Image (tube, rainbow, N blue to C red):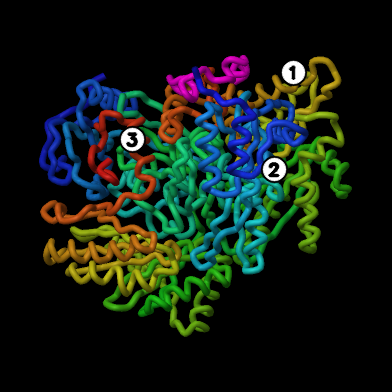
Amino acid sequence: MNGRASVSDLASRMAAVVGARNCFSEGPDLLTYECDGLTHGRTRPDLVVLPGSTEEVAEVVRLARASGRPIVPRGSGTGLSGGARPVPGSVVVALSRMRRILEVNLEDGWVRVEPGVLNLDVTKHVSAAGYYYAPDPSSQSICSIGGNVAFNSGGAHCLKYGFTVNHVLGARLVLHDGKVVDIGGPALDAPGHDLLAALVGSEGMVGIVTEVTLRLLRKPETTRTFFATFPSTDEGGEAVSRIIAAGILPAAIEMMDRLAIVAAKAATGLDWPDVGAALLMDADGPAAEVEDLSARAVKIAREAGALELRLPRSEAERQLMWKGRKSAFAAVGRISPNYMVEDGVIPRSEIAPVLREIESMAKDAGLRVANVFHAGDGNLHPLVLYDAREQGQEDRAEHLGGEILRMCVRRGGSITGEHGVGAEKAAYMADMFGDDDLETMKRVRSAFDPDCCFNPGKVFPSSRLCGEKPGPGGMEHPAVKSGEVQRW
Amino acid sequence: MVIRERASTPDDAIQGVAPRLVLEPSTVEEAIAAVARCAAERMAVVFVGGGTDLGLGARPSRLDAVIRTGALSRLVDHAPADQVVTAEAGMTLSALSEALARHRQRLALDAPLPGRATVGGVVAANAFGPRRTRFGAARDLVLGVSLVRADGVAAKGGGKVVKNVAGFDLPRLMVGSLGTLALLTTVTFRVHPLPETEVTVLFPGLDPDQVRGFAQAWRAAQLEPSSAAAVFASDRLDLGLRVEGFEAGVADQVARLLDLGRRSGLAGERLGAAEGAAFWRRHDAVREGGSVRVKVASTPSRIGDLARAWLPPILGELSPAGAVVYPTLGIAFASGEPASGAGLAAGLREARIAVTATGGSLVVCEAPPAIRPAFDPWGPPPPSIDLMRALKERFDPDRRLAPGRFVGNI
């Protein structure tokens, strides 16, 4: 017998640890936890638990394990890859109650926070002193640090400043057996393997982070932004290539195509012109350097065929330009009933031909694709527009999204630049990596979580849930029984 | 496929332990076959690139073979427009620099002894230089790796684009792993444009508090030198700051650094090209020289402890002695010739107790074989040692890759 406790038994044991209102197995609240930001894939968990401390997380993990249930860690649930999607029979451990900022050390440039702290709140906390936390995913006002750690989140400014992995100095981790371990810390180069590298971006599959030490940066002295329009993405892509080739490292360089511009205008009321492409670039650093870089970039953009160049006259105007860019995803809702966000990466020098290829693929599929992307690092966000009410459109959109990712891989890129693999893109991992590559990655995972009790069914395309081993407790995983695993 | 092999010479010994066999693959395929052969014959093996960091880590507990990657030295792919380069693991930093410079680019990883240090070795040893101040270390620049596992299976991780979060991060996991998990065969890095110009500003004769205070001051003033290093000169520190970029920005930052120094009561000078190079040679001499080299890692606010309390017990046992502190990293290196092994061991012990008590570490990077038994090169294992052992167990269950060389006898 498996000794699997009933949901109500487990719920009452969990409630004794976290309090009755922080644990539920039914009711409308459960709906929220059936999916992450990718709302079309939903799975009902057995139980949702919201622990308030490391000790509670450890006890919750022990109880979930003893009951033979897989554990799905969750931050704000803003992920776009189904990474926090529960599996049937799972316990969702949501960290949103753990949102204390524990310690700040400006001289040494770090802050220690709980995982439920929102990304932007870290910066807000130290902003008055002139510091900030660099990774800036577009969802930064609602996404949590724990989720950022799990998915190695990036953002528009990671071209110059790097990803979450470059800004995490230490972490406290609850392991599969409820043991708590500290990894790294404020001092650099602790002897031993770089376990933080294994942890950051592990998509909740190695344990539950309950504290994170983040690097803080001094704000740059000056930021100069310009907005440029082009007849098409060909000239826009060329401008990006020439700016980079000139030895300029922008803090961010973003591009939108015609359809994305139309959507952003509709959503924000910005007076952007109807053009084939728009470019938004930030240069930041010491004032004189930035003025110089910015002037060089503007000149290059003009030479590359810019139709119009706008330099914001105030910080408010600058923020508005960025708002146009950052609201682009949601804005697409104005021009299409439904859309899917993809997240492929290509070598940046291939932007123009890739966009043409996407356009022709979309045409063949009878769909429209709007493109919003981090042009400096070749990270595309094709938004596949469709109407779910039309028979077959959603399937065609999903298929087109997948084909776009495969094309990114063929061009030497990646299936994800910042959203992660999650449940949604696990099937495409085999396009990018061979069996031996994936098996090697699984070894890393199993060093932390030998029974694969954390977030099963993500990242790896195999229908085997955990290397050669059966699921938790040696019994058949509930996802296998239910047939759900075939999706992965 | 015939892999070049030969009997070992005294130069092939790792900290005095000689292998039976030396394998010198010259292609990735040969490297895979070499590791597979070690697996088939159950040989314990150490991977050697340029041999510049073989002093790092303990003496191997067992050694049958050495695989040298020196012949694995090709540039695999350089995409200047994408600022990405892939090199075979045995390519030296100098050779890579030369290839990149043709396109006015560089790998911003200025590890010591670039003429010998290989890209694979630099990654495996987490070697770095003063430009870490601005560009970070190997983990901030590596994008992808190809590797060969202990069982002879080749695998890859990461990719060839600057932004990629697909799958577990094998490239960064290799950084600093000292050949305990796998043999690196190729490494893909992000590269940067070569700066139009560089200028070094020198603030000589500072005390540790002045270095610490000035580091805070230039950060508060939002200045961004690409290198910051303080070289010990008897009981004072000579602080060198390098600014790189386009002419206009560099000239401005240099003027502002000098002005900021003046207002802090520090007399600085803008060095000419030759003087600047001479300063960085003094720095390099500490990082590259000495039969003893020690690394102390702490935090920037501990510079006073570093310079006044932690380094002196070590420096007192070395003659000649040198030291360099990276004030924004909180890391220092000391090097020199030991007077007596026992004295040095006592000095290291004293310093290590103080450093580790504040959350830092002291690692012996180089020491003569005769005095090595007197101290543990790594110090106390970190709280996460069980996870490291589990990782080792998954990657190398028979403990054949650099056995005993790593932290906690891994």
Give above or below for B202 relative to B136. below
Q: Are marks 1 and 3 on the same chain?
A: no
Mark 1 touching mark 2, by CB under 8 A?
no
Q: Nearer the viewer, residue A307 or A332?
A: A332
Magenta region: which residues? A466-488
- Tell which subunit mark 1 falls on: A
Which one is closest to the eye, mark 2 or mark 3? 2
The residue shown at (42%, 47%) is B138
In the rendered image, residue A177, in percent from the top left (x then y), is placed at 45, 36
Identified at 18% across, 61% down, the residue is B345
Please report the residue visible at 28 percent of the width from the left and 44 percent of the height from the top.
B406
Disc 3 marks a residue whose amino acid type is Lys
Q: Which mark is residue A395?
A: 1
For disc 1, the neighbor class at 10 Å (few under 14, some 14 to 19, many from 20) is: few
Q: Vertical placement of B264 versus B312: above or below?
A: below
Total marks placed: 3
> Is B313 on the left-hand or right-hand side of A16?
left
Helix, strand, or loop for circle 1? helix
Distance (Cα) linking label 2 and label 3: 42 Å
What is the x, y in percent for residue A260?
A: 79, 38
Whole-number angstrom distance, CA of label 1 to CA of label 3 = 44 Å
Q: How many angstroms separate mark 1 from mark 2 (CA)?
A: 39 Å
Residues at marks 1 and 2, common chain? yes
For the residue carrying disc 2, how many other residues have a C-alpha within 10 Å: few (<14), some (14-19), or many (20+)? few
Viewport quadrant of the C terminus of chain A: top right
Residue behind mark 2:
A21
Q: Position of residue B43 (x, y in %)?
A: 20, 28
Residue that numbered label 3 is attached to: B392
Residue B224: mark in rendering: none
A281 or A276, nearer to the observer: A281
